[in-house]
Image (cartoon, rainbow, N blue to C red):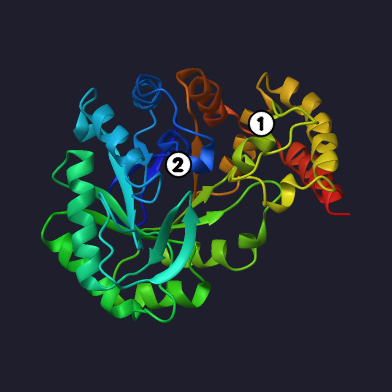
Amino acid sequence: MRYMELGGSGIKVSKMGLGTWAIGGGPAWGGDIDERQCIDTIVEAVNDGINMIDTAPGYNFGNSERIVGKALREVDRDKVVVVTKCGVIWGGEGGVYEGKGSVWNKVGDRQLYKLLTPDSIRREVEKSLERLGTDHIDLYMTHWPSVAPFETPIAETVGELNRLKKEGKIRAIGAANVSIDQIREYVENGELDLVQGKYNVLSRDIEKDLLPMCEKYKITMQAYSPLEQGLLTGAIPRDFVPGPGDARANKPLWQPDIRPRVHDMLDGFKPIADKYNCSIAALNLAWIMNQGETVNLLTGATSPEQVKQNVVAADVVLSEEDIRKMNEMAGAVYA
């Protein structure tokens, strides 16, 4: 496993992290996964050198955090960089919604809201620490920017994050799903160590502005959805159709007019994968890991076997010629 510094924090993180959205289960994923299997998946990742474990309260209403917390009791906590988030709240058990928040997404019959006020963030961090069973969060991120009618100035949000950092409740600060202008505001008001952005061989919008900005300010850019929620693994049958309520059902690349071209691209990738003695999934992960020193990778896995398949990508160094070939085949998907 390769390692890198997390922004300017001094924290060493694996070049590849483990995302636990799917591990949280729930309606967005068609139900829950066996808890023991989920814990074993996280433990396997840590044993294989992946020290960065990413979760969020919004992943099935705290269930992902609870599972991560149980896994932390089976590994050396000091060797794990725990990442969780704030800014997506809900009411009821485990939630912090108190009549404020901009209506956002609905999962099952439960409503989610966006809110990043200082008092809401403080309530959230305490809930997350409780679910995770730890006394600190290594990287605390805003999950989504706040929006009207409950829009909070970034300076106020960052102010509270800085206070939490001084108190030792968090060690580093990150932001997901933010614009270039919003990143500038974060940097102006405090240290920003990591930004998440969707990035894979078929989703490359961040190369224009986000990647150069991260290089300029020494911010780690962590790529999420590197395999398009499974589509780029090469293991999804051509005739598979996401069911109602499936988190993938409305994603552009999963639509019936695009997916056949994605499968054709993956067929074209097979000779390159064979050359490096890796799977199609590992090849797509390696493509991201070969995009620069500031790029980190967030992978998803729901079994120890999937983790073992993914970590292979950390040792795959692609030639410029093979990267060019992959880029050309990816371009044909949108042609």
- Furthest residue to the front? 109
Provide the secondary structure element on which disc 2 rests.
Answer: loop
Q: Identify the residue at image location x=62%, y=29%.
A: 282
| Left or right: 323 as drawn, with respect to 152 | right
Image quadrant occupied by the N terminus:
top left
Image quadrant occupied by the C terminus:
bottom right
Amino acid bearing label 2 = Trp
Q: Identify the residue at image location x=50%, y=18%.
A: 305
Q: Is residue 76 in view?
A: yes
Q: Does label 2 or label 1 sit earlier along the sequence?
A: 2
| Left or right: 181 as drawn, with respect to 285 | left
Percent from the top left, x then y, of residue 210?
A: 55, 65
Judging by the rendered image, the residue that carries numbered circle 2 is 21
Q: Nearer the viewer, mark 2 or mark 1?
A: 2
In whole angstroms, how far apart are the C-alphas of marks 2 and 1?
17 Å
Q: Identify the residue at image location x=22%, y=56%.
A: 125
Provide the secondary structure element on which disc 1 rests.
Answer: helix
| Left or right: 79 as drawn, with respect to 213 | left
Q: Is 130 or 220 nearer to us in this picture?
A: 130
Percent from the top left, x then y, of residue 189?
A: 30, 77
Tell me: residue 141, above or below residue 253.
below
Amino acid bearing label 1 = Thr
Determine crowd level at label 1: few under 14, some 14-19, many 20+ residues with C-alpha closer than 10 A: some
Q: Pointers 2 and 1 in contact (CB under 8 A)?
A: no
Judging by the rendered image, the residue that carries numbered circle 1 is 233
Tell me: residue 300, above or below residue 208.
above
